[in-house]
Image (tube, rainbow, N blue to C red):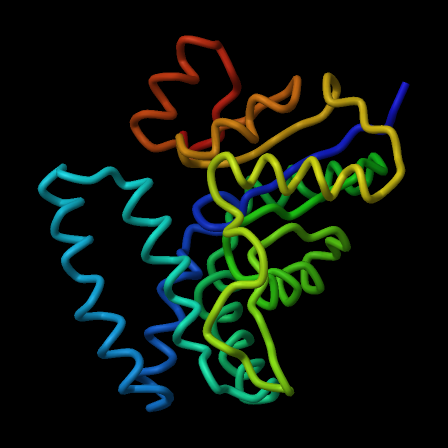
């Protein structure tokens, strides 16, 4: 029998905040890449309006918006970019942790389970969160660098939806360790993360959105939320 694992999403799951909101806030607060910020905002506001009008799905909005947000890091050297990532992690993640989920996380760690943080958030931010929560294994969206500066583009796939499950499987394969998926756990809050939930024998919906709640209730899966 293989090892039991526990896969945790970040935004809305481990924390109540949304890390992707932090990058544009940082640009405005610190007056960094403002021209790029305004170009990004005005070129993407139409997607938000289409989502509100139900013309495009929330999946499409988030996929395009968050993936394209990599442009806000364009031309930043590593030290300045790390200031941005630390600011986002502290303000939007570490200051908004969900106590119930952190208790679950600590239980898995005490049991010796393989705990993996899996998120579409940029990996630099996930690494900071992982260090604070003692999570060594991270699967996230990688930003591309050239000659010590961020290019504003992704390196590889955006860790979202179907790609999220694929990237997680690839990471597990790279560990060279047998994982018992039937005894493993997965935690997330959004319906578009259903592929990750269905990978394990113990899926857990955390403060689920309406679509995920409806699906989970038909399956009888566990839900974590305020009583």
Relative to 19, residue 91 above or below: below
Quadrant in the picture for residue 23? bottom left
The residue lying at 53 percent from left, 48 percent from top is 159
Q: Is residue 114 left or right of residue 95?
A: right
- Residue 110 in percent (x, y) is at 82, 40
- Residue 186 in percent (x, y) is at 61, 31
The residue lying at 67 percent from left, 42 percent from top is 105
The residue lying at 48 percent from left, 10 percent from top is 220
Relative to 214, residue 141 above or below: below
Q: Is residue 107 left or right of residue 89?
A: right
Quadrant in the picture for residue 31? bottom left
- Residue 154 in percent (x, y) is at 52, 64
Relative to 217, residue 83 above or below: below
- Residue 63 in percent (x, y) is at 37, 49
Quadrant in the picture for residue 32? bottom left
User: Of 223 and 54, which appears nearest the observer?
Assistant: 54
The residue lying at 56 percent from left, 67 percent from top is 143
């Amino acid at each position: 029998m293989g090892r039991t694992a526990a896969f945790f999403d970040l935004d809305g799951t481990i924390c109540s905040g949304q890390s992707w909101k932090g990058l544009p806030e940082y640009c405005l607060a610190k007056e960094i890449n403002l021209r790029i910020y305004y170009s990004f905002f005005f070129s993407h506001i139409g997607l938000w309006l289409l989502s509100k009008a139900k013309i495009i799905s929330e999946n499409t909005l988030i996929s395009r918006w968050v993936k394209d947000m990599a442009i806000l890091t364009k031309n930043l050297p590593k030290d300045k970019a790390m200031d941005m990532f630390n600011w986002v992690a502290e303000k939007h993640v570490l200051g908004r942790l969900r106590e119930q989920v952190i208790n679950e996380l600590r239980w898995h760690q005490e049991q010796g389970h393989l705990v993996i943080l899996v998120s579409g958030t940029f990996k630099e931010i996930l690494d900071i969160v992982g260090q604070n929560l003692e999570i060594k294994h991270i699967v996230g969206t990688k930003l591309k660098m050239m000659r010590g500066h961020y290019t504003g583009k992704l390196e590889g796939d955006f860790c979202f939806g179907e790609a999220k499950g694929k990237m997680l499987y690839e990471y597990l394969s790279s560990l060279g360790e047998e994982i018992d998926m039937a005894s493993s756990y997965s935690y997330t809050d959004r319906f578009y993360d259903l592929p990750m939930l269905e990978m394990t024998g113990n899926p857990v919906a955390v403060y689920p959105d309406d679509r995920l709640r409806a699906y989970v209730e038909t399956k009888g899966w566990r839900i974590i939320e305020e009583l």
